[in-house]
Image (cartoon, grey):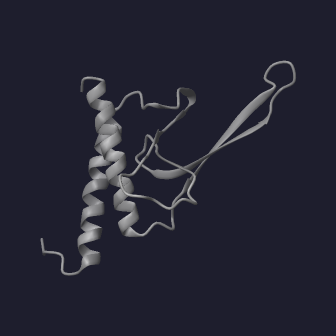
Amino acid sequence: MTAPTTVDDVLAESVGKLEVMLAELCGRLEPFPAFLGMSTIQAVELEPALASRTDRGCVVVTPDGAIAELDVAAIPGVVGVLEVDQVEQFKPLDDLSAEEYLVYLAAAIRALSEELRRRGG
């Protein structure tokens, strides 16, 4: 294996290694945590140590290791059964720079590692 030669090469290599680590952690968390106690959404909110852009909504990691923005909207439900229902959408964060993505990967790994420790694993 050749050593990385540019900053972009180093970032790409780091991203690849962290993505593998994140996928392994996701596979070990069965069941995957529920988002804010909602049984219908499996996701963990990410709170990066470094300040992130304030125009982002709620950034989460999903059971498959994807880092996405979670949008939960209330919609009218079935009258008499559910007055209000919800629709959740995971939006990919395609506009992240490699540096921002690394920060979110680190936050995801940290959050899932803490959850695994909490479960005794």
Which residue is at a point 29% across and 76% down the rendered structure image? Answer: 8
Does 17 sit left or right of 52 as displayed? left
Q: Measured from the top left, where is residue 67 in percent x and y?
A: 45, 52
How many numbered discs, if any? 0
Q: Is residue 105 above or below residue 85?
A: below
Does 47 sit left or right of 10 as displayed? right
As drawn, the residue found furthest toward the bottom would be 5
- Quadrant the C terminus occupies: top left
Q: Measured from the top left, where is residue 80 in percent x and y?
A: 86, 18
Q: Measured from the top left, where is residue 76 in percent x and y?
A: 82, 34
Does 14 sit left or right of 102 as displayed? left
As drawn, the residue found furthest toward the right would be 79
Which residue is at a point 35% across and 49% down the rendered structure image? Answer: 107
Which residue is at a point 57% across and 28% down the rendered structure image? Answer: 38
One can see residue 59 in this view: yes
Which residue is at a point 24% across and 66% down the rendered structure image? Answer: 13
Q: Is residue 98 above or below residue 70?
A: below
**Picture quadrant of residue 55:** bottom right
**Picture quadrant of residue 81:** top right
- Quadrant the N terminus occupies: bottom left
One can see residue 28 in this view: no
**Picture quadrant of residue 15:** bottom left
